Image (cartoon, rainbow, N blue to C red):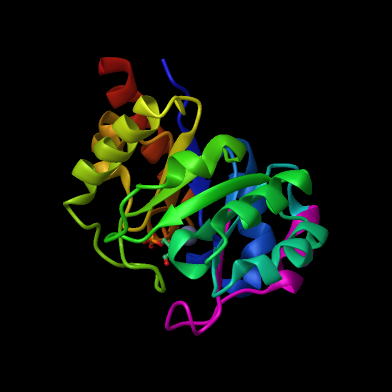
Amino acid sequence: MTEIQIAPSLLAADKARIGEVMGQLDDHIDVFHVDVMDGHFVPNISFGPSLVESVRPHTERPLDVHLMVERPERWVSAYREAGADWISVHAEATAHLERVVSVIRESGGRPGVALNPATSPAGLEYVLRNGDFVVVMTVNPGFGGQSFIEASYRKIAAVRRYLDDSGLDGVDIQVDGGVGAGNAGACVTAGATILVAGSAITGAPDPVAAAQALRESARLMAANS
Ligand code: DX5
Ligand code: ZN
């Protein structure tokens, strides 16, 4: 049975209490997801390298930095130096995807490629020999708290088939946007192995209970599939 990883997004946390929330969640999750938005690639601005640097001492878990920025190649070293372990970049945001994935890998990080809802996985087979995961965006990036796009189940399954057919069966699929205990199981059935959740975990009144509920629903589904 594939182990599912739970990745709470810090975007939905109370920004004045991020360290505290991370401390509560640490034993119950696998990786912390940090959403970086530049106001160009997406119509919102969120965290920068200094936030990554200040949350770094609060956990030994990997920090998964999701770069929703134009030309992410300009930012890889700043985020690695700040303490990012995983870095995902959008296929739509750079003309040189292979290069940025390789630079992340050479720096010792785990590279991921994120796909907006309308972006197909075509071409990833040439890029992901050096990559570890694909982020299937299940909302249009830019904001937390949006509704999960239902067509995403087919997309997750199609990306899984594509990766398997391309000999990339070791590449994980992360789902990001509108994921919660109600749809986590269906995402796992479709092929997701890393579940990002903002509103459903760090935005919940009891983040630990919410993380446990998410893991439980993912686990039930994984056990049955
Ligand atoms: C959306 C971000 C997500 C966001 C998810 O642009 O990439 O990681 O934090 O938030 P929820 O889970 O609330 O949709
Ligand atoms: Zn994200």
The answer to whether residue 209 is above or below residue 165 is below
Residue at 29% across / 67% down in the picture? Answer: 146
Highlighted magenta segment, given as a residue range: 33-57
Q: How many marks?
A: 0
The quadrant of the rendering that contains the C terminus is top left
Q: Please tell me whether residue 44 belongs to the stretch shown in magenta.
A: yes
Q: Residue at x 62, y 74 (%)?
A: 47
48 displayed left or right of 58: left
Q: Is residue 50 left or right of residue 113?
A: right
Please state which of residues 13 and 41 is positioned toward the viewer in this rendering. Answer: 41
Q: Quadrant of residue 96?
A: bottom right
Residue at 30% of width from left, 62% of height from top? 139
Up-down: is 182 above or below 9? above
Left/right of residue 146 with respect to residue 201 in the rendered view: left
Name the spot of residue 9 as percent of width and height, x first.
51, 57
Q: Position of residue 42 (x, y in %)?
A: 44, 78
Q: Nearer the viewer, residue 164 or 135?
A: 164
- The quadrant of the picture showing ligand 1 is bottom left
* Rendered position, 81 above or below 168: below
Is residue 206 in view from this perspective?
no
Quadrant position of the N terminus in the picture? top left
Viewer-proximal residue among 103 and 214 = 103
